[in-house]
């Protein structure tokens, strides 16, 4: 639970018709168009989208390093265009490719940033020590960054965004290129930063598992437009055509089971029935409780041994692909 260090139940940032076009005429690229967003304090807000969807552009507009061509943003009560320096004192950014000075030691890296943000030598050293401990880098603190693995460098880069105790952090693809163990470590650290410390996080990712694990709410961007907004569970529910139920039957009777299910529920246009990837599994999509009951009855009547009937949780991945494959259907109302 948040310890209330930063005020909760307030708005961390809003955008009004925020947009950015690069270039002009035939060469113009609309990186972001008409973004209307509200991020609450203390939440992990995901910006999800394919390469080129506009995630990094959004972050750069929100922290004032890029000028919008339309609309505006208010971030921590400030206009990023006018109050960029003040905003950057209260926010931190992990960019897509964080630059670390390979010659510096981890401790020096953090202490130097502390000094840049106005801490005295003693305070900067204390802050560096605390972060090295929190980020599991204590043992290697006095080695140059050049000797670090990619995962360690990413943890150090993440620690560096926290040197000045920012209220709001932008993380642009924080686990890109990390192995699953290192990625999980980063996930734990992001959780600590928000759940225990009450910071707000805006997280760009194209990793659906990451979005589902970490984000309270997600905006899905596609070619610069927001096509969906909601909690991962809401998006998954709204976009999946009913639930999927997986049947596992005796492998040698699978074809027979499929035929029996077809006869029982195949006439219902809302229901999709097909064999799963694993031998002996059958997927029933879009069936309500009656459909599932009819399917089970049909298998029992056909005397097919049923080993399991398991309802599947809809995933954000299903929702995401449903959305990006059907762009013409437009925005899903929140
Ligand atoms: N400085 C720039 N000059 C010209 N075009 C740009 C610039 N920055 C971004 N773009 C274009 O804007 C669009 C959105 O890019 P952006 O970097 O925001 O996408 P992204 O969602 O972060 O993608 P990725 O997942 O690849 O990081 C792309 O078509 C990109 O080529
Ligand atoms: Mg990007």
Image: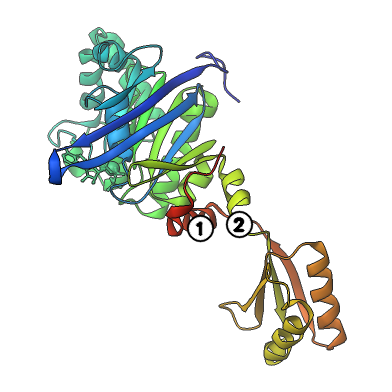
Task: Give the side of residue 314 with respect to residue 76, left or right.
Answer: right
**Residue placed furthest toward the front:** 25
The label shown at residue 240 is 2
How many numbered marks have been drawn onto this rendered protein structure?
A: 2
Residue 187, which numbered label? none
Query: Residue 58: x percent and y percent?
Result: 32, 33
Proximity of marks 1 and 2: CB atoms separated by less than 8 Å: yes
| Residue 3 falls left or right of residue 69 | right
The quadrant where ligand 2 appears is top left
Give the residue at x 50% y 21%. 41
**Distance of mark 1 from mark 2, alpha carbons?**
8 Å
Which corner quadrant of the image does residue 232 belong to?
A: top right
Residue 314 appears left or right of 85: right
Q: Which residue is mark 1?
A: 322
Q: Position of residue 231 (x, y in %)?
A: 57, 40
Pick the front one: 174 or 295: 295
Residue closer to the observer: 138 or 280: 280
Crowding near the residue tagged with mark 1, few <14, some 14–19, many ≥20 C-alpha atoms within 10 Å: some
In-image side of 314 versus 133 (left or right): right
């Amino acid at each position: 639970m948040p310890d209330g260090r930063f005020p909760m139940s307030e708005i961390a940032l809003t955008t009004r018709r925020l947009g950015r076009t690069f270039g002009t005429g035939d060469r113009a690229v609309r990186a972001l168009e008409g973004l209307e967003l509200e991020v609450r304090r203390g939440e992990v807000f995901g910006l999800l989208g394919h390469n080129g969807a506009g995630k990094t552009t959004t972050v750069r507009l929100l922290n004032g390093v890029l000028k919008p061509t339309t609309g505006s943003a208010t971030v921590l009560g400030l206009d990023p265009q006018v109050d960029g320096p003040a905003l950057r004192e209260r926010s931190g950014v992990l960019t897509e490719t964080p630059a670390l000075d390979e010659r510096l030691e981890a401790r020096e890296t953090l202490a130097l940033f502390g000094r840049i943000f106005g801490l005295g030598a003693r305070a900067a050293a204390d802050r560096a020590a605390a972060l090295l401990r929190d980020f599991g880098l204590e043992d290697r603190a006095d080695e140059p960054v050049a000797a670090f693995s990619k995962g360690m460098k990413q943890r150090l880069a993440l620690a560096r965004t926290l040197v000045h105790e920012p209220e709001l952090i932008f993380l642009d693809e924080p686990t890109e290129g990390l192995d699953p163990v290192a990625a999980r470590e980063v996930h734990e650290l992001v959780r600590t930063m928000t759940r225990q410390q009450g910071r707000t996080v805006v997280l760009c990712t194209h990793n659906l598992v990451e979005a589902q694990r970490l984000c309270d709410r997600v905006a899905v961007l596609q070619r610069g437009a927001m096509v969906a907004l909601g909690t991962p569970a809401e998006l998954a529910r709204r976009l999946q055509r009913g639930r999927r139920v997986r049947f596992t039957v005796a492998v040698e009777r699978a074809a027979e089971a499929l035929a029996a299910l077809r006869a029982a529920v195949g006439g219902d246009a809302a229901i999709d029935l097909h064999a799963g990837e694993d031998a002996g599994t059958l997927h029933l999509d879009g069936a309500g409780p009656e459909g599932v009951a009819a399917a089970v009855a049909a298998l029992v009547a056909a005397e097919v041994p049923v080993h399991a009937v398991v309802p599947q949780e809809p995933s954000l991945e299903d929702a995401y692909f449903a959305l990006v494959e059907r762009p013409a259907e437009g925005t899903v109302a929140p």
